[in-house]
Amino acid sequence: MTALVQLDDLVVRFRVGGGFARARAFNAVDRVSLRIDEGECFGLVGESGCGKTTLGRAILRIHAPHSGTVKFAGQDITRMGGNRLRTVRKGMQMVFQDPYGSLDPRMTVEQIVGEPIRTHEPARRGVLRERVQEALVAVGIDPDRLGDYPHQFSGGQRQRIGIARALAIRPRFIVCDEATSALDVSVRAQILTLLADLRQRHGLTYLMISHDLGSLRYLCDRIGVMYLGRLVEVAPVAEIFARPRHPYTRSLLSAMPIPDPRIERARRRIPLSGDVPSPLAAPTGCCFHTRCWLHQRLGEPPRCATESPALRDMPTGKVACHFSEDMAAQDTAL
């Protein structure tokens, strides 16, 4: 497989607090290395504040990396700017979380969907309208509604318009940032089916950012699990659900509802204690050890508190845990 997106030791740093001299810095994305292959759908999951959205925006260069590299289609775009970056951005688009806030209420559907075309591929009005209509038809919106405004559409229709805007310049790679989380369950299923269909028809590559493991299971080939700015596990979808190798992944899966009441009653939940630490005061050693049930069951090994585990290769994927081999010995059936 050919890598479309390649990240190596990517760090995205922000400053908070009053005044530059007194501001405190923290890494929202901390030394992330990741490969997304051409045509792949890669899912990214984790609790709020773990850095998922920041990572997606750094790939698109909405956020500038502090260190590390971002490559798109073999080109290093980490420090790229100006017209060169604009040319590369034609191949990358984003679908945002909020279908109500991501569309300008003062613009018509034709203006919204046509904006990326006007920016990247100036065309005559007749050609522009045809391209907009083509994008709307692809997502199931009536092309005769070009003159309507966002408030005249439902939430699901607005998200379809956002997807049409992303498709308008025929990108290769789309970041979907919680693209279904603000929608009703039935509408969410429709949007997921649409994304799967568009991927097949147009050969798209996706980065799917979500809290919903069920959605990622339906759509993705591989899943990456993030915690406090770091990737702690990466594996194919089937392996993530059948044999999670990181204790954080297992806790997330245990919180996922199962529609069969008999299985739901029989399985054992693994609740996490406490809250996610502040990135301004990140734990030493393993970033997860302060909440890790496996760390506690093994007698709180000092290695977890002092040595940060690398994301190392396993037979089924990658995991950042000193004691992932001990997972099978634990009585933690899901």
Image (tube, helix red, strand yellow):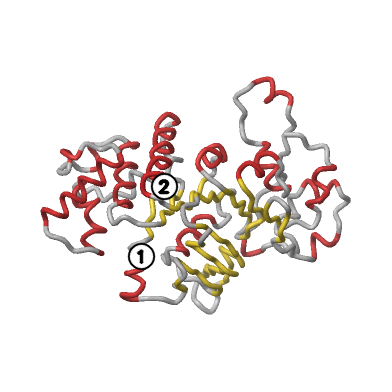
Residue visible at 81% across and 43% down in the picture: 328
- Three-letter code, disc 1: Arg
**Residue 86, how many percent across, how many down?**
32, 69
Query: In this view, which residue lies farthest toward the bottom?
Result: 21
User: Where on the picture, by quarter, is residue 8?
Assistant: bottom right
Comparing labels 1 and 2, the label whose residue is closer to the camera: 1
Which type of secondary structure does the marked residue at label 2 adopt? loop
Q: Earlier in the sequence, mark 1 or mark 2?
A: 1
Q: CA distance from mark 1 to mark 2?
A: 20 Å
Query: In this view, which residue lies farthest toward the right?
Result: 299
Which type of secondary structure does the marked residue at label 1 adopt? helix
- Is residue 182 shown above or below 25? above
Q: Which residue is mark 2?
A: 97
**Residue 31, how many percent across, how many down?**
61, 67
**Residue 37, how many percent across, how many down?**
51, 57
- Which dot marks residue 49? none
Left or right relative to 54: residue 161 = left
Query: In this view, which residue lies farthest toward the top?
Result: 262
- Is residue 58 shown above or below 95? below
Q: Residues within 10 Å of mark 2 (few under 14, many from 20)?
A: many
- Three-letter code, disc 2: Gln
Which part of the image, by quadrant, shows the C terminus? top right
Residue visible at 11% across and 53% down in the picture: 126
**Residue 191, how many percent across, how many down?**
40, 38
User: Where on the picture, by quarter, is residue 321?
Assistant: bottom right
Query: In this view, which residue lies farthest toward the front?
Result: 1
Q: Residues within 10 Å of mark 1 (few under 14, many from 20)?
A: some
- Which dot marks residue 89? 1
Residue visible at 71% across and 42% down in the picture: 243
